[in-house]
Image: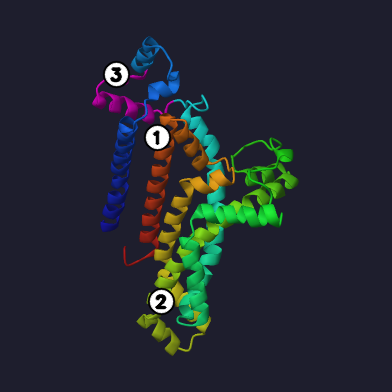
Amino acid sequence: MSRIRALAAALASVPITLFGLILITFLIGRVVPIDPVLAIVGDRAPQDVVARTRLELGLDRPLPEQFIRYVGQLAHGDFGRSVMTSNSVGTDIARFFPATLELATAALLIAVLLGVPLGVYAAVRQGRWVDTVIRVVCLSGHSIPIFVLALLALLVFYATLQWAPGPGRQSVVFDGMVDQRTGLLLLDCALAGEWEAFWDALKQIALPALVLGLSNMAYIARMTRAFMLESLQGEFVITAKAKGLSAAAVVWRHAFGNILVRLLTVIVLTYAGLLEGAVLTETIFSWPGLGQYLTGSLLNADMNAVLGATLVVGLTYVVLNLFSDLMYRVLDPRVR
């Protein structure tokens, strides 16, 4: 019964959080010094056109009535129309978000595959030169601004060594060759059997994913090291050593197994941060994702697009945070 109550409480927090998110985004859209009507009709439009457009959008009504109308539109999946693209915001988000999803997933794989082993190894070798080197590398990776790291990567690997292709998601030769079934270019190329386009897309994603992955690898490695240092001092580790288990079994089966749940939470929330759209990275690498869409919308005073993208980012955080909480309860018997 207690498990059901805990699950119900976790699920009940979702609509409350979403309501708060919708309310905040609505208020932000009303208090920013940008007139959505002028963004649509232009600064030089006649006053009668401005007044008629304001009336059609319902912006002449009281704020509570506008909010009710806004929630009603969202309930029907209507985020409004983008001034920048002239498409519905929902259509634009569905087109741009898969690129961010693909880049974030690749970056997370790099961050986890490098960060977790480095964090474990640093904890096992605590106080030695290897631990110091790993800590310095992680501190540097976490401290260097992402745009500096991205520009250095382009300068070295693209401009100087010419190992990496230029910015963009795919070369011009392969652009439009593969039908967008899922929006995930690598998967679409594989499903279509277009392996030349697949390898081209893989080359294009390698450098931005590496930049994002290294930046987040530093954080994951630091958290892994901190968790492992605490776990290695536990009595169960001393007992495992006394039983004569190998060092690998003690470290990976017992010590690492004890931190797996907490580490999973860190990884999931890191993924949520990547999915919000790495704005600077996507802009520098001309990656057509949600971050670049959000940046362009802000520069063009396209508030419908800004609010729609913000809601999607918030929803992503809520869903992944709920997933992390549920996995915590499933994997950790102490919580149950």
Q: Does residue 252 appear anywhere in the picture?
A: no
Number of numbered discs present? 3
Residue 11 location in percent, x, y?
A: 32, 47
Identified at 46% across, 25% down, the residue is: 81
Asked if 36 appears above or below 121 in the picture, the reply is above
Tell me, yes or no, whether the two marked residues, 3 and 1, touch with CB atoms within 8 Å. no
In the rendered image, the quadrant that contains the N terminus is bottom left
Q: Amino acid at mark 2?
A: Leu
Q: Left or right of 23: which side holds 93?
A: right
The disc at residue 229 is 2
Q: Left or right of 205: which side holds 161?
A: right
Q: Which residues are magenta?
A: 57-80
Asked if 32 appears above or below 14 in the picture, the reply is above
Residue nearer the viewer, 235 or 61: 61
Q: Amino acid at mark 1?
A: Leu
Residue 133 location in percent, x, y?
A: 52, 75
For residue 60, what is the image quadrant? Answer: top left
Alpha-carbon span between mark 1 and mark 2 = 42 Å
Label 3: how many Cα within 10 Å (few below 14, some 14–19, many 20+): some
Instruction: Write down the residue under mark 1.
Output: 307
Which comes sooner in the sequence, label 3 or label 1?
A: 3
Identified at 32% across, 45% down, the residue is: 14
* Render colour scheme: rainbow
Alpha-carbon span between mark 3 and mark 1 = 19 Å
User: Is 291 part of what is drawn in magenta?
Assistant: no
Instruction: Write down the residue under mark 3.
Output: 60
